[in-house]
Amino acid sequence: MNKPKNLTTKEVAAILNCSESLVRRQDMKEKLGAFYIAERALRFPKDQVDEYINVQKKQSSDNSSEEPAAVKKTLHRKKLHSNFDLF
């Protein structure tokens, strides 16, 4: 029976291409199913990290199929107001 692979914070950050501090945030720890194996040793189950990536990819592809939001064009730059009339 194969034991599931557990990843360190550094490994997860490399996989997700983000900072370690982002991986350590409470909401990310919950999304990735983090657990402590010692007082300060944080680990992430590889299968849950893979599942998180797949969900993010699916959400990204679902959002890209929607129509892009209309962008309002501004022809004139707004003038900055100043008491000294510098602009």
Image (tube, rainbow, N blue to C red):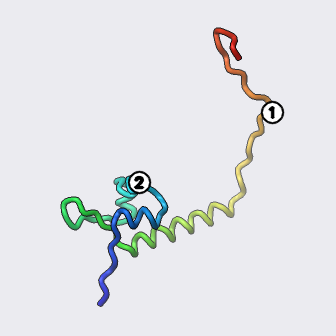
Three-letter residue code for mark 1: Leu
Q: Is residue 45 above or below residue 80?
A: below
Residue at far bottom of view: 1
* C-alpha distance separating marks 1 and 2: 39 Å
Front position in the image: 67 or 36: 36
Left or right: 49 with respect to 35?
right
Front position in the image: 40 or 68: 40
Q: Position of residue 42 (x, y in %)?
A: 28, 63
Q: Position of residue 65 (x, y in %)?
A: 68, 63
Q: Residue at x 35, y 56 (%)?
A: 24
Q: Residue at x 62, y 66 (%)?
A: 61
Q: Position of residue 78 (x, y in %)?
A: 72, 25
Which element is circle 2 on?
Answer: helix
Which element is circle 1 on?
Answer: loop
The crowd level at tag 1 (other Cα within 10 Å; few <14, some 14-19, many 20+) is few
Front position in the image: 84 or 1: 84
Return the mark for residue 75: 1
Return the mark for residue 14: none
Q: Is residue 84 above or below residue 63?
A: above
Which residue corresponds to mark 2?
A: 22
- Corner quadrant of residue 37: bottom left
Q: Position of residue 15 (x, y in %)?
A: 46, 67
Residue at far left of view: 39
Three-letter residue code for mark 2: Leu
